[in-house]
Image (tube, rainbow, N blue to C red):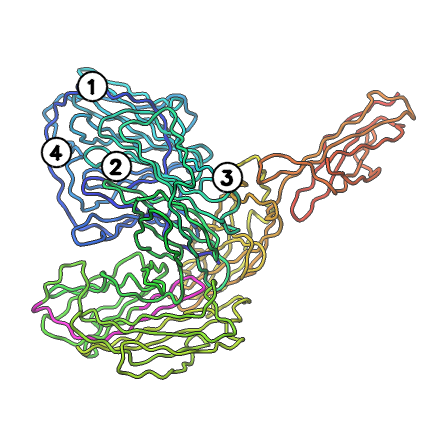
Amino acid sequence: MRNTGISGIARIGATGALASALAAAAVLIAPAGAQATEGPAAPAQATAAPAGATLATGERLELTPGAKKGAAPDFRVLPAPGAEQPGRYAFAHTGGELEVQPHGRKQPVPSTTVKTGVASTSAAPAESFAGTSNQSVTFSVANTTAAAGSLMRVFNLSTWMSYEVDTDQYDLTGKASLPAGTYLALISYSSPQDPSYLLAKGFTVGSAPVSVVFDQAAAKEVGIVPDDPTARRASASVWLTTPKGATFGDAGGRGRTFVTPLSVTGVKVVVHEMLTKNGPATYKPTPYLYDLVHTFERTVPTTAMVKVATSSLAKTTTTLRAQAGDQTGTLHSYPKLPEVSPQTWAPLYMPSTITEYVTPGLTFGRFGPHGLTLADRTLTGTGAPETIGRAPFGPNSSQYGTDRTRYLMWIREPNSVGDADGNDGSPGGYHSMKLTSRGTVLGEQRNIPTSQSFASVTVPEEPTPYQLVHDVTRRARLSTRVTREWTFTSDGYSNTTPVGERINDLVDVTFDTTGLDIRNTAGTAPVTISAKAASRDANATATLTGLEYSLDDGATWTAVTVPGTEVSASAEVTVPATARFVSLRASGKDSNGATNRSTVIRAFAGPASTTLPSEQAGATTLTGLSVNGGKPIVLDGSYGLNWLEAEGKFTASDPAGIRRAGMYLYRGSYERPTGVVDMYSTGCTKTDAATSTCTFTTMLAPAELADNTLAGTWNVAAFAESLDGTSFVDNHAAGTVRIMRPTALTTDAGPEPVARGGKLTVTGTLTVSDWLTGKKVPYAGRPVTLEFKKAGTTTWSKVRTITTPSTGKVTTTLAAWHDGYWRLTSPATDTTTAVAGPADYVDVR
């Protein structure tokens, strides 16, 4: 099963915003001596950052607290349900607002704007210039065939105040009303099968309307090229930052990116690129990963492909652990520059150990597979090795947590599923909470997405005992359910904790293990399980009071000896060969009287996890599954990075209704797949209260597969969950679909005409599409059958069969007696399509 982790994140600076992978094109030479007539913009009111919003694509845009109190918020774009990475998008952050515009889609979709809570004077409100004489300015793009939506911004070159442009959703045009001055216009866009573009254009507004035309043809490709010829782009980000910190850019995808050569004082254009070994990095381990950044200060030259030597880079070794099998994952990175930085990502196969080469001396923020937030990293030479994703995935103590004011309490426990090395994790899935006091329920919410916060709970001001339960359920191989049960006493009399910082009334319990392999699986040797208690009150003393393990998902528990006077305890456990998973439970207390019991179901895998059967609980059913309408998916290597869309669907039913469903394709075994193709959900439509039809789609590019051995029969895994979260079906063998390479066959019969009884020679060449090179290559060792259809008839008759040599070319000679048509055919295999060459008519005289 694949791991769905965080898709992307970037830090918003005090007057700027985040960005990602670029695309670009349009020439700009900024005019000198620009004059501005506009007045200053009123500062935006700083407000608390919202939780985020769902984009029109189903992806999730989230704002999260900054690294410390008072810092600007981060934001991240999470993939649509079932997807591994987000799609391409443009963004602009000005005036305390972040606008994200998905692009590169089959159909244009609207943008999404959220307030970031960052005060800024870089955006011009319309009312600021009510008394001025503005001019109409129109925008368009020359030398383009693209017809998708776009994102545009205009900046005054004297004040760097920004202006929004009203863009058309269905073509690359826009309009604005601007006062006199000299400006820089920016546009970002892409079409599904085209590169991305970030175009720039300088212009002046005087006393007449202005038409601004971006020139796509003038844009130049931008990127970072290491001296390893096997390296290929995984994804790239390009963004422009103004002297006042406003940011405009584009993110996503591994296609080519183009930017307009420009020279503007105070402007920076940053390129961030991640590269892996050419081939299917998501299906086979890549031996290395490049994480490279280059900044163009003031000038982007006409030759913007920057070459770097591997020997000049810092490096380290990173081990990516998996969850009870082989999965795909994603590693995200963003440079922490003085202004603003975006996220870029690389899909990776897990488990694996890779060598990372990074731009030296630069600090990177990082997000790992399994939804983990990794520590910032700065490398200058050879760094210490690092392991990511060590089980158990469970609660971590962090600076964020449940907080309160005098009369209100917010249940916030975002770090419920971090790894054993203390990396915080975004759990995904759903969570529930229940707060009680003296037998009275004060607040309860059940089964809401973990991306959503619980509502605040009104609580008494006086010291009051509380019982709090926080429960997380998620789709994963490990840590499928994490439950924490607290008792504590809290009051609001002396509470000076600012909203957004945790209260100190709780105690935490964390887990650790040693002796697991790279798939977080126990072998025949004993495994050491550990637990540790920690109070959130720095002045309190914590004690671990219990530690247990379960081999049956928590149905029964075995206690290990715990002193009951220490902060931690550990024990060796020999996991039976028949155990698929091991669950952990531990309890602790502190000197304030607070207690905690934490449970992690399926904390790590047992020896029997090499075979994982389908599972079902309750009455949920899944029927009528199909992929691509039941037909094979034929993928031509000549498509390269261009996509072929395939759809899937099934019917899910449960008496309580359906909450969510999922589907993906895998090659090989479920536990050790040789390939995984994610299918993201396009929604479940109710047919009645109990039943829904769920649809999914995937975009396949042969250059992404890049391995001909992945052609053939793929298995379909599918799941559905009930609306109340009490039942589910998880079918690991719900169906099959073939992903095939197309073949081609020529036919040439001669001479024409031919004498009756004369010698006729028929030749042809059988080729097959190569996903790695994108070319047609000879198809050797395949049967090719010569067929004849007599003139005036409709039936083809087989004449003889020949086996193709290494060249794929066949030749056969025979006597010709009748007028008619000759052709060559070759049958299908599990991996390649059947083909019939063109019919060649021969006149016999």
Observer able to see residue 227: yes
From mark 3 to mark 4, how far is it between C-alphas?
45 Å
Q: What residue does disc 1 label?
A: 32
> Does label 3 or label 2 sit earlier along the sequence?
2
Q: Nearer the viewer, mark 1 or mark 2?
A: 1
At label 1, the amino acid type is Ala
At label 4, the amino acid type is Ala
Q: Residues within 10 Å of mark 3 (few under 14, many from 20)?
A: some
> Does label 4 or label 2 sit earlier along the sequence?
4
Q: Nearer the viewer, mark 4 or mark 2?
A: 2
- 170 and 673: which one is in front? 673
> Does label 3 or label 4 sit earlier along the sequence?
4
Q: What residue does disc 4 label?
A: 41
> Does label 1 or label 4 sit earlier along the sequence?
1
Q: What residue does disc 3 label?
A: 643
The structure residue drawn at horizontal position 39% and vertical position 74%, both measured from the top left corner, is 529
The structure residue drawn at horizontal position 26% and vertical position 48%, both measured from the top left corner, is 74
Q: Are marks 1 and 4 in contact (CB under 8 Å)?
A: no
The structure residue drawn at horizontal position 57% and vertical position 47%, both measured from the top left corner, is 629
Q: Nearer the viewer, mark 1 or mark 4?
A: 1
